[in-house]
Amino acid sequence: MTPETYRGVLERAECLISCEQVEAALDRMAEQLTVQLHDKDPIVLAVMTGGIVTAGLLLPRLPFALRLNYIHATRYRDTTSGGTIEWRHRPGTIIQGENILVVDDIFDEGDTLTTVVNACHEDGAAAVTSAVLVEKNRSRTCTYRPDVIGLVTPNRYLIGYGLDYHGYFRNAAGIYAIADTDID
């Protein structure tokens, strides 16, 4: 696809959630996380790549001591459907005995977040809390649920605020559902 083709995708997309609504959701998430983690000295693990946007917007709202790192487990690899989990970076021993906050952009099928949280437990984390900006309203085979959820959307293909389409539109100002005709 050309850059012009991708611009057309955004032009045809439907804005589901405005910037103001996303910012309000981030404020609510920060309030919940502050109650849960203010005295825990957590290590925040941003799930690459979309989770870095959520973490970057969320962290300045957290008024307590924390450390930042990342974890990279991917299923999509710039495609529009998930495959098998591929590990690119797993923090390992640095999380042993630590309170962990996993931050991701979306809880879709749940496979990636379930795998990441399980890996944190396997690597010896004392406790794991998870937060996602968006949860799709859909059925899932996994039983895991994020601890903190910012927004719930219909089960559509979303872009913006970290969510991408073939690696594009993570920077869209709002959360958009792309047109069904653009899904490949």
Image: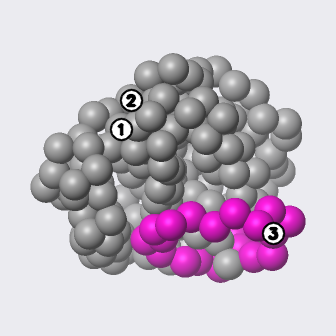
Q: Nearer the viewer, mark 1 or mark 2?
A: 1
x, y percent for residue 60: 18, 50
The stretch in magenta equals 138-158
Amino acid at the residue labelled 3: Arg
Q: Is residue 75 magenta?
A: no
Q: Nearer the viewer, residue 84 or 68?
A: 68
> SS of the residue at dot 3?
loop
> SS of the residue at dot 1?
strand
Give me the residue at 32% from left, 43% from top: 42
Q: Residues within 10 Å of mark 2 (few under 14, many from 20)?
A: few
State yes or no: discs 1 and 2 in contact (Cβ < 8 Å): yes
Q: Is residue 46 above or below residue 108?
A: above
Numbered disc total: 3
Q: Is residue 86 above or below residue 35?
A: above
Amino acid at the residue labelled 1: Ile
x, y percent for residue 155: 71, 74
Q: Residues within 10 Å of mark 3 (few under 14, many from 20)?
A: few
Mark-to-mark CA distance, 1 and 2: 7 Å
Mark-to-mark CA distance, 2 and 3: 28 Å
Toward which corner of the image does residue 17 lie, by quadrant? bottom left
Query: Can residue 42 be seen from the camera position used here?
Result: yes
Q: Is residue 29 above or below residue 183?
A: below
Location of mark 1 (residue) = 43
